[in-house]
Amino acid sequence: MSSRRRFLQQSTTALLTTVSIPAFSAKVSNSEILAAQKLKAALSPEDFAKEEEFWAMIREAYTVSATIINLNNGGVSPQPQHVQEMQYKYIQMSNEAPSHYMWHILDQGREPLRQKLAELAGCLTEEVAIDRNATEALETVIFGLNLKAGDEVILTKQDYPNMVNAWKQREQRDGIKLVWLNLELPAEDDNYFVQLFSNAVTDKTRLVHVTHMINWMGQILPVKKIADSVKKKNAAIEILSDSAHTFGHFDYTIPELGCDYWGTSLHKWLCAPFGTGMLWVKKEKIPSIWPLFANGDPQSANIRKFEAQGTRSFPAEQAIAYAVDFHNAIGSQRKEARLRYLKNYWAEKVKDVPKVKLHTSLKDAFSCAICGFSVEGIPTLASAEFLFSKYKIHAVNIEWENIKCVRITPHVYTSLKDLDKLVVAIKDLATNGRS
């Protein structure tokens, strides 16, 4: 059996190498990006963030609209053209003989992809599961934990709705107790968050759910400090980090967070294909988590037990690797610095405009690309509609648990010219109203 398995693996690998995938036609290649940034290698990430010629080249790698300014990248981000085209090529390949190409050819790329993601995340390969989004990753843990009636879970009212509803379902089904925290945001003091979570711990606390970055307005929470504080009270307490908005956004490794479980969407800041995500489970915790989709050995210590999804999008999954390569060509620190620079660029220009209020800190420790604003006397929905109807700026209004703002989320392809137009639009809104 082992020799037959080796023969099949060698045969499918050989087939994959002979399949012809046409060269992509993107205007900018990763090698060109690498060459351009090497010319400025002596610059700090903060200085590199201001190199407009380089970032103009990055914009050329995307196929974003030339008429609509997309400033809602926090919902879902576009993919570089090369990522799109590789997904299209894999779709074409799959449709030639679906079960053959998908299960016997493309599936051979899953393990190298797992290694690539683990390298970017700074964790063990055997701790990474590839799924479809942060919701699937986090609900795998939420529904897979061995919790009983009376066990307490700490979370906040500002957490993402899918996670809130998942925990409420466990509360209804299993009788666990949800301990709700209500955050006052923005906040610029780590101790505020640490004390809030720590004070909620009791002898019945089993898990703390922490949203790494509040999606509504970009507040970064000190996951590591919160984890250290609650575990100091009880080392058995586990930490689940909702990092949907942080992976590929700013530079960190998963182990640095001090959490036990972590999930993200790769189609956000990493710019991978839509419907791709990643779950991380600390190695020693894997056996105790029941998979969301059943398999033959649900208490296995193998991370792959969380990938029994049935038929999935092999083309989308395999194209993730090209998004990782694009991200690495820019560099995590340079990307983080550019995203923060873009946020500060427009926010600094409107923060003192009469009637305008920022809902996000401008300090590096507490925010990166996402920032919210509001205009006194004008509903957030009306403000967002004004931006689009008059200036064709696509943003999103937020109204969720004492947060009311218009959320602005640029990405690496966003130009300063786009943000100058945003500033003009906000000043117009504040001065002349929405009419």
Image: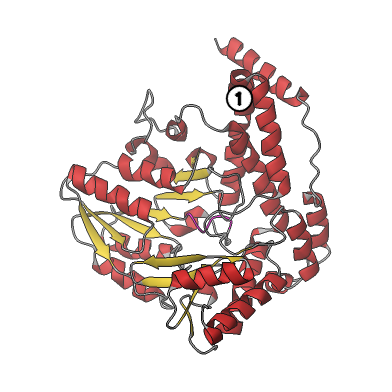
Taking the spot 55% from the left edge, 85% from the top edge, the residue there is 432
Taking the spot 55% from the left edge, 53% from the top edge, the residue there is 76
In the image, is residue 353 above or below residue 73?
below
Which range of residues does the magenta coloring cover? 244-248
Question: Label 1, on which residue?
Answer: 102
294 sits to left or right of 397: left
User: Which image quarter: residue 250?
Assistant: bottom right
67 sits to left or right of 144: right
- Scheme of colours in the image: secondary structure
User: Which image quarter: residue 188?
Assistant: bottom left
295, 76: nearer the viewer? 76
Residue 367 visible somewhere in the drawing: no
Across and down, in percent, residue 130 comes to 51, 39
Q: Main secondary structure of the magenta part?
A: loop
Taking the spot 72% from the left edge, 47% from the top edge, the residue there is 81
53, 387: nearer the viewer? 387
353 sits to left or right of 305: right
Residue 370 highlighted magenta (yes or no): no
Residue 309 visible somewhere in the drawing: yes
Across and down, in percent, residue 342 comes to 64, 71
- The residue positioned farthest toward the front in the image shown: 435
